């Protein structure tokens, strides 16, 4: 499992994949990523401290992810992240959270005292597809409601059951309303969902210009950030 990398092209930064407690929701129909967790706080902190020691501050920007939300990291890990931010002169953080924790986002921003780009797994702005088909349990209705808490939506394309019209609408929303977004091309995993190869090929061709858009990061494989397994 690779847990440290540097992203050298868009939004240059160091990125860490830490371990956390189990995801508070853990029922998304497409996800097996949440299996990277533990209920042993000592085990989690030991691993996370080891990974955090690799941070150099090279770009003054750090992204921290885990198999769930940043709010599922133990207190000691959060304290150590804060120490690293101060020691290495980190000027900006990327963190991620489920919609469930939206009312705690402000608290986390105040805790770290540096600008944070808060990501959220939206997957799709189509309400029914997001919450019924994908079982995301992110029940916001409008873009404005999402923007009250989060800065950067993470979208997903290429699942059977998704349509071109859904994707077009999602891309329009992300490009016109957010300063940063991540597009994940669905990678088959242990879930029951299937990838739609024809839809993926259509997306790659139509939206290849996003590769040159500094606001958008497209992950054609789920390990394109250089962390994970």
Image: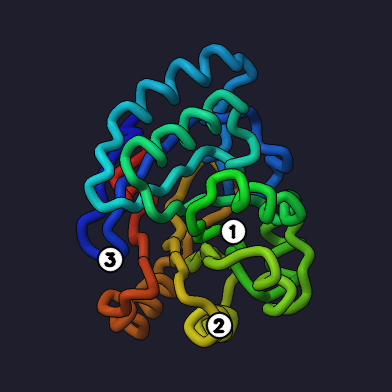
Q: Secondary structure at mark 3?
A: loop
Going 58% across and 72% down the picture, which residue do you hit?
162
Decide: is 132 above or below 19.
below
* Place of residue 73 in the rendered image (x, y in percent of width and height, measured from the top left): 59, 32
Q: Nearer the viewer, residue 229 or 104?
A: 104
Please state if 11 lies on the left or on the right of 133 as rendered: left
Q: Nearer the viewer, residue 128 or 56?
A: 56
10 Å crowding of disc 2: few (<14), some (14-19), many (20+): some
Please state if 210 lies on the left or on the right of 127 as rendered: left
Q: Quadrant of the N terminus?
A: top left
Q: Quadrant of the C terminus?
A: top left
Q: Badges 3 and 2: C-beta atoms under 8 Å apart?
A: no
Question: Looking at the rendered structure, which numbered label has been put on residue 106?
Answer: none
> Disc 3 and disc 2: Cα gap in Å?
19 Å
Task: State the residue position of label 1.
Answer: 120
Going 45% across and 50% down the picture, which residue do you hit?
188
Please state if 178 lies on the left or on the right of 86 as rendered: right
> Disc 1 and disc 2: Cα gap in Å?
14 Å
Question: Looking at the rendered structure, which numbered label has been put on residue 177?
Answer: 2
The image quarter containing residue 228 is top left
Decide: is 61 above or below 123.
above
Going 55% across and 58% down the picture, which residue do you hit?
118
* Place of residue 37 in the rendered image (x, y in percent of width and height, measured from the top left): 56, 27
* Place of residue 77 in the rendered image (x, y in percent of width and height, measured from the top left): 52, 27
10 Å crowding of disc 1: few (<14), some (14-19), many (20+): many
Q: Is residue 135 visible?
A: no
10 Å crowding of disc 3: few (<14), some (14-19), many (20+): few
Please state if 220 lies on the left or on the right of 141 as rendered: left
Task: State the residue position of label 3.
Answer: 10
> Disc 3 and disc 1: Cα gap in Å?
19 Å
């Amino acid at each position: 499992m690779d847990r440290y990398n540097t992203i050298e092209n868009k939004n240059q930064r160091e990125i860490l994949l830490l371990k956390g407690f189990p995801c508070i929701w853990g029922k998304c129909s497409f996800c097996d990523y949440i299996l990277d967790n533990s209920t042993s706080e000592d085990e989690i902190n030991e691993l996370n401290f080891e990974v955090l020691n690799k941070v150099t501050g090279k770009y003054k920007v750090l992204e921290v992810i885990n198999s769930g939300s940043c709010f599922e990291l133990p207190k000691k890990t959060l304290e150590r992240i804060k120490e690293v931010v101060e020691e290495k002169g980190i000027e900006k953080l990327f963190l991620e959270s489920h919609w469930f924790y939206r009312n705690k986002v402000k608290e986390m921003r105040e805790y770290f005292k540096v600008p944070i780009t808060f990501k959220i797994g939206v997957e799709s702005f189509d309400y029914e597809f997001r919450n019924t088909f994908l079982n995301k349990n992110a029940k916001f209705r409008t873009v404005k409601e999402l923007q009250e808490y989060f800065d950067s939506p993470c979208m997903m394309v290429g699942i059977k059951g998704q349509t071109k019209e859904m994707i077009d609408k999602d891309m329009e929303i992300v490009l016109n309303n957010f300063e940063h977004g991540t597009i994940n091309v669905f990678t088959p995993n242990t879930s029951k969902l299937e990838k739609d190869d024809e839809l993926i090929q259509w997306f790659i061709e139509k939206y290849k210009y996003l590769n040159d858009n500094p606001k958008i990061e497209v992950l054609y494989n789920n390990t394109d950030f250089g962390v994970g397994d």
